[in-house]
């Protein structure tokens, strides 16, 4: 099952978002905008959060817990608090290329595709930080 438990609360806590390196340079106004469009979610260990070939409807930011990203050619990457996943399908408007599984109880924030794209246009510093992280991941995957 690919569904995660959404808390039904739109608008995450500023303090948890401030801990995410991707957002640490954002102003209070920008954090408020981000908080307004994000939804808290929880997932249990073993839960599949994204599947290869499925549409990318949003991006996920990990606040607590860990996930394993299973990429093509057998590459596996562990992500933890402060990291994000699902951005490639959103940025490229293509199906997901990896399977993501929670490896521990997980808490995070989900941002829908359209909201993320709007934020990236409004917040160039966030777009640059995301681009840098995506580039690091690409280099790491190619050298694995």
Image (cartoon, rainbow, N blue to C red):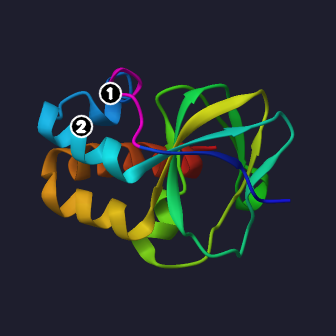
Residue drawn at the location 78% of the way across and 59% of the way down = 2
Tell me residue 70's x, y (percent): 74, 51
Tell me residue 25's x, y (percent): 18, 30
Q: Quadrant of the C terminus?
A: top right
Q: Quadrant of the N terminus?
A: bottom right
Which residue in the protein does label 1 denote?
14
Q: Residues within 10 Å of mark 1 (few under 14, many from 20)?
A: few
Q: In the image, is 60 to the left or to the right of 34?
A: right
Tell me residue 139's x, y (percent): 47, 47
Q: In the image, is 122 to the left or to the right of 59?
A: left
Tell me residue 4's x, y (percent): 72, 50
The residue range painted magenta reads 11-16
Q: Is residue 99 above or below residue 130?
A: below
Sequence order check, earlier mark of 1 and 2 = 1
Res. 132 visible in picture:
no
Q: Is residue 90 above or below residue 77?
A: below
Which residue in the protein does label 2 denote?
31
Residue drawn at the location 71% of the way across and 75% of the way down = 53
- Is there CB contact under 8 Å for labels 1 and 2? yes
Res. 25 visible in picture:
yes
């Amino acid at each position: 099952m690919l569904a995660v438990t959404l808390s039904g609360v739109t608008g995450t806590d500023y303090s948890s978002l401030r801990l995410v390196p991707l957002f640490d340079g954002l102003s209070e106004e920008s954090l408020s905008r981000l908080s307004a469009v994000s939804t808290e979610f929880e997932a249990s260990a073993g839960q599949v959060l994204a599947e290869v070939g499925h549409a990318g409807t949003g991006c996920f930011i990990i606040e607590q817990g860990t996930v394993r990203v299973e990429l093509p050619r057998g590459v596996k990457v562990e992500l933890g608090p402060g990291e994000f996943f699902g951005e490639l399908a959103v940025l490229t408007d293509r199906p997901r290329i990896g399977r993501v599984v929670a490896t521990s109880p997980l808490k995070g924030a989900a941002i829908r595709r359209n909201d993320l794209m709007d934020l990236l246009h409004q917040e160039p510093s966030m777009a640059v930080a995301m681009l840098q992280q995506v580039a690091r991941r690409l280099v790491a995957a190619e050298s694995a």
